[in-house]
Amino acid sequence: MEEDVAWGDEADGGRDGEQYDRSERAALRRVVGLSTELEDVTEVEYRQLRLERVVLVGVWTSGTAEDAENSLAELAALAETAGAQVLDGVVQRRDKPDPATYIGSGKADELRDIVLDTGADTVVCDGELSPGQLIHLEDVVKVKVVDRTALILDIFAQHAKSREGKAQVALAQMQYMLPRLRGWGQSLSRQMGGGGSGSAGGGMATRGPGETKIETDRRRIREKMAKMRREIAEMKTGREIKRQERRRHKVPSVAIAGYTNAGKSSLLNRLTGAGVLVENALFATLDPTVRKAETPSGRLYTLADTVGFVRHLPHHLVEAFRSTMEEVADADLVVHVVDGSHPAPEEQLASVREVIRDVGAADVPEIVVVNKADAADPLVLQRLLRAEKHALVTSARTGEGIEELRQLIDDELPRPSVELTVLLPYTEGGLVSRVYADGEVLSEEHTAEGTRLKVRVHEELAAELRGYEPADARG
């Protein structure tokens, strides 16, 4: 039996953190356009979106009705982030999506009526559609149809700022659109035939099977993708050099990870005072942002903000954005932020942990930060604190719990392993600064000979300091 769950617009949720003007990004929106006649493969279009008035449609194959509505609510948030106005949403109960039209021919006709009634210009499906499903559903509803993957890619394209971020987006777009290139049909395929032997003027004998236009396009796209992967690998080397520099100085690193729109950037701002873009939109951060921060005891560490996670992120997108996750894998500590006001925070935690495992960061110590406490149900907060061993509640908007988080980060970061006492002459001010930056100062005393410090430092710095150990401190 099929059943429909109608779903309408959601009220705009509470904004978290200082809001920045969005007009700069809005001004850079791409124009609409579809083409399989690729004049230049660098201008590949993957069904570019101009989402203005959309109807959402989902297929509910398992779980509860509430799960299905939560999934559609998330799709609505994604659509709004892409610049859409959500007019309506429907969920259909099926064992599995229809192989031809995703929702079945009868429901596709009903969807066409909803599109006509609402005046929508786009249908957004809560799943990844095959090329055939896209074509058949468009033929029925008579407006553009996009799937969840294309929607996420559109958001990624809007939000990528760095050269690497843009390259990652372009690669993911080409991976997505490669199987979705639409030709002119087999009877109209243009072919680039090979030359035959013995016929000077061409004609039937000279036409080999050759390569259709669409095959040529696909080959060129694959070549472009291979070139882009090489470029991304070179950019990765630059990032690795920076990370090695941080390791050489033994600056501990903390990665902020979490579901998209959980408030990670707001938390980063609270912890560091950094003016990172903060807005109530999914995927507002796409490029890894690394900032310096200081623990209450005065230790320096780096904080890396990462791209938000999302449920059922297609695997090739995880691969394409692996570089943004590498900050998590290389971190000494993961601050895992979850939205305490979300209807299903446990699902968010599970989704993020799944991707953290995918990028090889399962063994990195984790602090769970339940954010947006000011908007959350106190019973939900208690439930999460009971379930998560290493958790605390914060609000990046009000500042609640931020000092406790700073202290917990201080407690959890790895500490230098070598403890020693040194007497540094006043001429060695640079060395004193390094001890404060890269180690821990347990005590400090100014004497006639210089600064006497009891410190805990890493082995490399300890090797430099051992020459300054006073006689009374040597074993």
Image: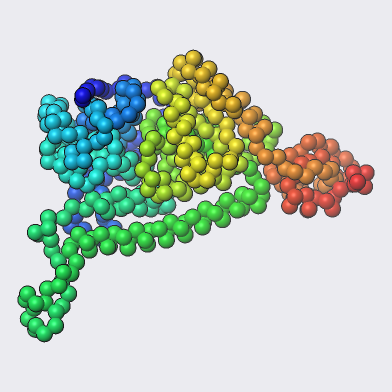
- Quarter of the image for the N terminus: give it: top left
The location of residue 345, given as percent across then percent down, is 45, 25
Q: Find residue 80 and report its horizontal and vertical position in percent.
A: 30, 31
Number of marks in picture: 0
Residue 340 visible: yes
26 vs 424, left or right, is left
Question: From the viewer's perspective, is residue 430 above or below residue 353?
Answer: below
User: Considering only vertical position in the picture, is 375 above or below 148?
Assistant: above
Q: Quadrant of residue 156?
A: top left
Q: Residue at x 19, y 55 (%)?
A: 36
Q: Is residue 192 left or right of residue 172?
A: left
Residue 136 x %, y %: 15, 42
Residue at x 76%, y 38% (from the top left corner): 441
Instruction: Between residue 454 and residue 425, name the one nearer to us.
Output: 454
Q: Which residue appears at 51% of the width and 19% of the height?
A: 383
User: Is residue 201 toward the left or the right of residue 331 in the image?
Assistant: left
Judge by depth and name the residue closer to the eye, 99 or 170.
99
Residue 86 visible in the shown view: no
Residue at point 37%, 62% (across, down): 227
The scheme the figure's colours follow is rainbow
Nearer-the-camera pick, 256 or 295: 256
Q: Position of residue 148 (x, y in %)?
A: 29, 38
Q: Is residue 223 above or below residue 55?
A: below
